[in-house]
């Protein structure tokens, strides 16, 4: 059989590898900074661009989309070419993909500190960046499918199935979660409101973990682990079961992020049931990986790459067992909104994603530079420091979570909350947060060691940009294969369609009834749209990233209703574009904060939180007092809200500016009457208006009324 | 634990239908795998081990 000569493109792999390292260090450094801000608030630097609320999303997006994202593309571009025995479809598209993705990252790193955010967790970028992500993702897809189509290997290996599922699912998730109505270049509102928005966001958020942090890494595990161990995967049959079960089940589990909220009960129950079922395919993948090392465990002692892979798989197993456990309502009642979730996420991110990325970098860089790794000893040191870093990160966070979760719920024998002041529970866990920062610093120092080691490796060798290869061209299929999956393995488009169907079923079953059946979201007659000033205040709340530390959903527990007030109802959020329920209580819930304190309390609290709450770790927001509110957008915002279904009248919109001024002057007069000198056009006034409105509408009606009544 | 997946106020058909869909899907895939030929599985397992790369030539940049 005649062999065709061709080259593998290693340059694009190298480029993505370098980007992975650079953005990894940036993302981890910002993570360390936000960790330290939670211990020493002065590290917010009294600058609006460096406060926790604005840069925490920089950290999450940097590590997810910049570090892990570039890691995915590095691994996929290397393995795709070799598994398909073909060069990437187009060098031009590879270049567009690489530079486009880096520009998206830079744009995100600039806009988020400026407060240009949509507030949807892990999707905070505003609409122009969302459009750019869509375009670049399509470029990646064309390049990948182009390569698959011109392949010289008839059957697609399991790694490629995971890449296909990643491509199609991320596309669906991103598009559905990014349906926004722009009102300007850098401001938009989500189409959905309240409960629906929450369901969409956590369908996206959960499955971003599934299909960005998990499936592409499973694909890479199926390629790189056999290469590192120099033996094939343990069971190919198990990999088929693993793949289809995982992509089918994962998509259903999103609602476990919203237990005890106003989300319909049946959706929550579906989320719980499928979360428990998810253990099976997840562990199937982990076991398939670990058993691949059977007979090769001696290599784990000497090969740093395998050390990293073993811990990565173990962390995957731990995180995928812990996730379903956290979805049990009894556990969730204590763990949710605490540092447990942060620990859970970081066991996955630091252990699974981080360590596998390091393993691949250590394995791949010497190969494309045709040399040996500069120092195996340094890589082993990195492994141990990184492992210590994970332990120092996770254990104190679990400890902090249990301590704080129990303190929130503790009553005295007399039946009152033992810790009525939320701050008391925050101060109790500061030492654990210090240990967490040490863990993060250890992990980052390991990554810096790796960078030094890899730079020295690159200098020692020389990039083989075009690696020669040869393989026979594919001949037409003459024998019809009987096994259906065998046939499917050579039909990429059919494979894509079936994967799409598998991931769509769960989303449709959960979302369609919540969107189409009005009884799933009972309305409350007394709940009215926000005023013009409150809308502006709400957008300041979004700009400052308050949702990163404060929830707006009171769960139906005695410990919460006593602390915060009446539990939250679905009908209270029908005008909330976007929902702002949050996912973590670094500070107290704010849904019932309205009218709880006088206007001056809020003014003092934003000027310096320690005035009203001595010892508070919340940053100060003095610029809200100095900066003038941009009221030029008020009418456009109300118009946009009306298009989205909020019942503003023509009069509301026509008189928006006058109404805004009238309400602002009322608040300013109240503040000035208490010895302050505040002008009505300052941002602080709008924020106070919003905070004083929160959760108060329900008090205006003696009885909640639903559409079923 | 079990109350949360049984007490669904008349909406349990969502859950039951969803579980049935998965169960049928899982059983179908399981049967197919049971009947899969060992040669095919072994061939697929071996794909990553053969990356078709050739010894280095003068294309080094």
Image (spheres, coloured by chain):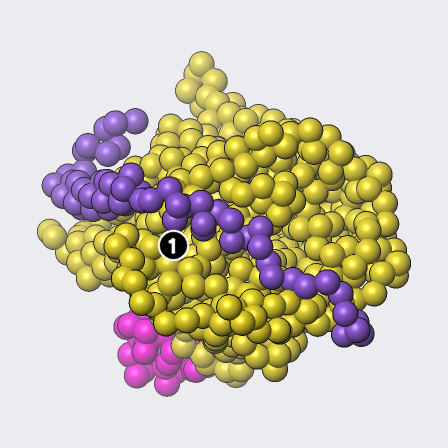
User: What is the magenta range?
Assistant: A633-662
Q: Is residue A661 magenta?
A: yes
Chain letter, colour yellow in render: A
Q: Position of residue A437 (x, y in %)?
A: 73, 40
Q: Colour of chain B?
A: purple
In the picture, measured across the screen, residue A166 lies left or right of residue A516, that is right
Q: Is residue A395 above or below residue A507?
A: above
The structure residue drawn at horizontal position 30% and vertical position 27%, both measured from the top left corner, is B1
Residue with the mark numbered 1: A203
The front one of A661 and A248 is A248
| Marked residue chain, label 1 | A
The front one of A376 and A383 is A376
> Can you see residue A181?
yes
Q: Which residue extends farthest front?
A: A1
Q: Which residue extends farthest top?
A: A413
The structure residue drawn at horizontal position 34% and vertical position 68%, both measured from the top left corner, is A477
Q: Position of residue A78 (x, y in %)?
A: 62, 62
Q: Is residue B47 above or below residue A135?
A: above
Quadrant housing residue A426: top right
Q: Is residue A615 above or below residue A676?
A: above
Badge 1 element: helix
Q: Give the prevailing secondary structure in the magenta stretch.
A: helix
In the picture, measured across the screen, residue A91 lies left or right of residue A575, that is right
Q: Position of residue B57 (x, y in %)?
A: 77, 70
Quadrant housing residue A92: bottom right
């Amino acid at each position: 059989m005649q062999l065709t000569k061709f080259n593998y493109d290693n340059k694009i792999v190298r480029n993505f590898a370098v980007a992975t390292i650079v953005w990894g260090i940036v993302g981890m450094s910002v993570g360390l900074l936000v960790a330290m801000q939670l211990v020493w608030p002065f590290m917010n630097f009294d600058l609006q661009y460096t406060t926790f609320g604005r840069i925490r999303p920089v950290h999450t997006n940097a590590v997810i989309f910049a570090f892990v994202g570039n890691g995915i593309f590095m691994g996929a571009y290397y393995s795709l070419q070799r598994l398909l025995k073909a060069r990437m479809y187009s060098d031009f598209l590879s270049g567009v993909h690489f530079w486009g993705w880096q520009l998206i990252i830079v744009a995100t790193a600039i806009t988020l500190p400026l407060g240009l955010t949509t507030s949807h967790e892990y999707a905070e970028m505003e609409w122009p960046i969302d459009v750019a992500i869509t375009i670049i993702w399509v470029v990646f897809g064309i390049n990948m499918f182009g390569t698959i189509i011109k392949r010289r290997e008839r059957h697609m290996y399991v790694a490629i199935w995971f890449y296909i599922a990643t491509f199609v699912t991320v596309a669906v998730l991103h598009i559905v979660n990014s349906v926004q109505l722009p009102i300007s270049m850098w401001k938009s509102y989500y189409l959905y409101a309240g409960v629906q928005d929450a369901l969409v966001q956590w369908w996206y958020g959960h499955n971003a973990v599934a299909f960005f942090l998990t499936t592409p890494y499973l694909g890479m595990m199926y390629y790189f682990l056999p290469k590192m161990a120099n033996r094939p995967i343990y069971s190919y049959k198990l990999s088929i079961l693993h793949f289809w079960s995982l992509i089918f089940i994962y998509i259903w589990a999103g609602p476990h992020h919203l237990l005890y909220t106003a989300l319909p009960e049946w959706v929550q129950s579906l989320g719980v049931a499928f979360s428990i079922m998810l253990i099976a395919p997840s562990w199937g993948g982990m076991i398939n990986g670990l058993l691949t090392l059977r007979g090769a465990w001696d290599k784990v002692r000497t090969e740093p790459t395998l050390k990293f892979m073993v811990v990565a798989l173990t962390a995957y197993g731990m995180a995928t067992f812990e996730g379903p456990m956290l979805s049990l309502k009894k556990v969730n009642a204590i763990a949710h909104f605490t540092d447990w979730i942060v620990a859970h996420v970081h066991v996955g991110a630091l252990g699974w994603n981080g360590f596998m990325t390091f393993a691949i970098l250590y394995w791949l860089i010497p190969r494309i530079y045709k040399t040996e790794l500069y120092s195996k000893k340094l890589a082993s040191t990195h492994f141990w420091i990184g492992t210590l870093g994970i332990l120092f990160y996770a254990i104190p966070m679990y400890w902090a979570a249990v301590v704080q979760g129990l303190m929130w719920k503790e009553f005295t024998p007399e039946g009152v909350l033992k810790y009525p002041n939320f701050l008391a529970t925050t101060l109790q866990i500061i030492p654990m947060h210090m240990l967490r920062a040490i863990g993060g610093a250890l992990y980052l120092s390991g990554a810096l060691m790796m960078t030094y080691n890899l730079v020295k490796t690159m200098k020692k060798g020389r990039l083989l940009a075009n690696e020669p290869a040869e393989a026979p061209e594919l001949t037409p299929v003459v024998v019809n294969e009987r096994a259906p999956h065998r046939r499917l393995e050579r039909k990429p488009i059919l494979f894509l369609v079936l994967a799409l169907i598998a991931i769509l079923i769960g989303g449709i079953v959960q979302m369609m009834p919540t969107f189409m059946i009005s009884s799933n979201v009972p309305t409350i007659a007394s709940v009215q749209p926000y005023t013009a000033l409150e809308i502006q205040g709400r957008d300041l709340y979004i700009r400052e990233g308050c949702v990163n530390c404060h929830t707006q959903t009171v769960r139906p527990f005695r410990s919460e209703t006593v602390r915060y007030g009446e539990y939250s109802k679905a009908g209270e959020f029908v005008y909330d574009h976007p929902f702002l329920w949050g996912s973590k209580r670094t500070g107290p819930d704010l849904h019932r904060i309205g009218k709880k304190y006088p206007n001056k309390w809020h003014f003092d609290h934003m000027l310096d939180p320690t005035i009203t709450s001595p010892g508070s770790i919340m940053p100060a927001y003095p610029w809200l007092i100095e900066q003038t509110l941009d009221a030029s957008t008020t009418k456009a915002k109300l118009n946009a809200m009306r298009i989205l279904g909020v019942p503003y009248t023509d009069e509301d919109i026509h008189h928006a500016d006058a109404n805004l001024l009238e309400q602002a002057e009322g608040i300013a007069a109240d503040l000035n009457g208490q010895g302050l000198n505040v002008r009505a056009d300052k941002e602080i006034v709008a924020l106070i208006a919003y905070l004083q409105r929160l959760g108060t509408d329900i008090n205006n009606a003696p009885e909640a009324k639903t559409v079923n009544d | 634990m079990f109350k949360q997946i049984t007490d669904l106020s008349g909406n349990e058909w969502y859950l039951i239908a969803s579980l049935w869909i998965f169960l049928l899907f899982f059983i179908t895939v399981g049967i197919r795998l049971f009947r899969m030929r060992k040669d095919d599985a072994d061939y697929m397992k071996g794909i990553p081990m053969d990356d078709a790369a050739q010894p280095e030539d003068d294309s080094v940049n």
